[in-house]
Amino acid sequence: MRLRDQVALTLPSLMLRLILGITFLWAGTGKLMGTFEVMGDDAARLANIGIMPTTPAPVAAPESLIDSTTIEDLDEPVNTSEDLSEQANEIIESIKEQLDAPEESSDDPATDPVPDPADEPKIDLDKVQLQTVQYSGTVHAGSDFPDPMEVKRVYSIALMLSQAADPGLTQDSTPIEPIMPAMFGSKPWPKVLAWAAAITELVAGIFLILGIFTRLSALSTFSVMLVAMWMTQIGPAVIQSNDAILGFIPRVDDPWSPGSYIALFWQLALAGMSAAVFFLGSGAIGIDRLIFKPSQRDPYIHGDPKAAKNSRASKGSQNAPAADRGEFDRTPNPTP
């Protein structure tokens, strides 16, 4: 095999692997290490699927414990310790008097009213069980999170899944069509799938750079990009939009602007490169070449067996003209 044929079979796979590996390694690390801010409805949505802990509201002090001292009185020195000690002693004395006081009861026990068991309230166990199941979870609203709060960037995927499975209502209270199954919007699927996507990007990026399990890693990144394209680009255009270009391309104000479809083209390019690496494999530079030996029937490694048989059949003819391999001939070398 000529040198340029070897380079043509080795360099494309290596370059695609490096580009994909660095990109997904950066993306996966950013999701695991970075943070982003949420507030309002987004924070409430994350709290409802069990990702972000809720912040308890401050409890107001009872009016009886509020001191009636005015601001003008604060200029004068006040002996706070003595006042507190006197109040504590008064409270303790009142409790002792209540404990020492005998309970009033009638002298004749027969005159005491006997409680009727029929008058006692009955507890409906079915209603209690239904109420327990119905209110077992805590529901949060956007007003519970007025201030921005930081969460891990990996949970942005969980937020996208929740919004895709349960998009809510429009401004005129019209239900929005979901673009993902409803089960992906409830616990624990958003959190599980978010971590699975981030770990897949990180591990697949490392494997693509090293060239180990290359086809499996490329298939994983291809699947991740297909889901990303559906949730962010194609899905909303196909299901939720009535004004998509060709029925599946999101419509923008200026379609010829370089930044209009940069996210769509970037996702499409990564998906295409992943598909190419899946069919090409790791190439000659990769750990897969050390682990998985090439097939004995690979014509690019061991030659074309049919051509070898024809060569042996015509071996006695010394004057047979040699096969002319043109400059653009890319067929396998006929001899081993």
Image (cartoon, rainbow, N blue to C red):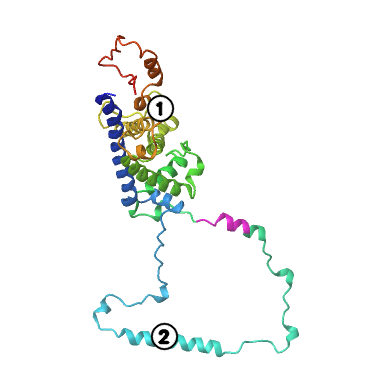
Q: Nearer the viewer, residue 301 or 88?
A: 301
Q: Is any atom of residue 260 visible in this view?
A: no
Residue 14: percent from left, percent from top: 29, 34
The amino acid type found where label 2 is placed reads Ala
Magenta-highlighted residues? 129-137
Q: Which mark is residue 248?
A: 1
User: Please, what secondary structure does the residue beneath circle 2 have?
Assistant: helix
Q: Nearer the viewer, residue 232 or 170?
A: 232
Q: Residue at x 66, y 86 (%)?
A: 105
Q: Quadrant of the N terminus?
A: top left
Q: Residue at x 55, y 87 (%)?
A: 99
Q: Is any atom of residue 88 visible in this view?
A: yes
Q: Is residue 228 found inside the magenta-colored segment of the image?
A: no
Residue 118: percent from left, percent from top: 74, 69
Task: Work out how far the residue at label 2 is from the one at label 1, CA to CA, in angstroms.
Answer: 74 Å
Residue 137: percent from left, percent from top: 51, 56
Say whether residue 25 is left or right of residue 123.
left
Q: Which mark is residue 297?
A: none
Residue picked out by circle 2: 88
